[in-house]
Image: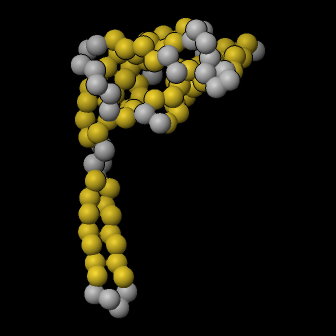
Amino acid sequence: MYAVIKTGGKQYKVCAGEKIRVEQLSADIGQDIVIDQVLAVFNGADTQIGTPLLAGAAVKAKVLAHGRGEKVHIFKMRRRKHYQKRQGHRQNYTELQIESIAA
């Protein structure tokens, strides 16, 4: 059984017992959260797809950690204009442990 959820402007395919990294959420470490923006739930031949969200469906998850991702290097240059700009960015994330999927 797996579900497709939406959080932080992105969609994730999740199964029970799986660990995922999502955009940073305002929740404490160890706290249980409920994600109610479920787009679809697949359980063998039984498939439920929302329009756009599935009413009554929810995914329970536990917050494991907060952190920062790998550094992304940005380099901009204009040829023959003597313009070079270097920049870096690290995106914040929250690591979740998916506990259960309720359709």
Residue 3, how many percent across, how many down? 58, 21
Would you place residue 32 above or below residue 89 in this image? above
Q: Is residue 40 visible?
A: no
Residue 65, how many percent across, how many down? 26, 26
Q: Quadrant of residue 24?
A: top left
Q: Nearer the viewer, residue 52 or 47?
A: 52
Residue at x 25% of width, y 35% of height? 67
Residue at x 38% of width, y 19% of height? 97
Q: Nearer the viewer, residue 73 or 7?
A: 7
Q: Nearer the viewer, residue 18 or 77?
A: 77
Q: Is residue 44 left or right of residue 91?
A: right
Q: Is residue 10 visible?
A: yes
Residue at x 26% of width, y 63% of height? 87
Residue 75, how many percent across, how many down? 32, 69
The way the protein has been coloured in the rendering is secondary structure
Q: Is residue 97 left or right of residue 92?
A: right
Q: Is residue 98 left or right of residue 4?
A: left
Residue lying at the far bottom in this picture: please name it: 80
Total tally of numbered discs in the picture: 0
Residue lying at the far right in this picture: please name it: 45
Give the quadrant of the N terminus: top right
Would you place residue 51 above or below residue 93 in this image? above
Q: Nearer the viewer, residue 42 or 55?
A: 55
Give the quadrant of the C terminus: top right
Would you place residue 83 above or below residue 53 in this image? below
Q: Is residue 100 left or right of residue 39?
A: left
Residue at x 64% of width, y 26% of height? 52
Q: Quadrant of residue 2?
A: top right
Residue 100, how many percent across, how many down? 48, 10
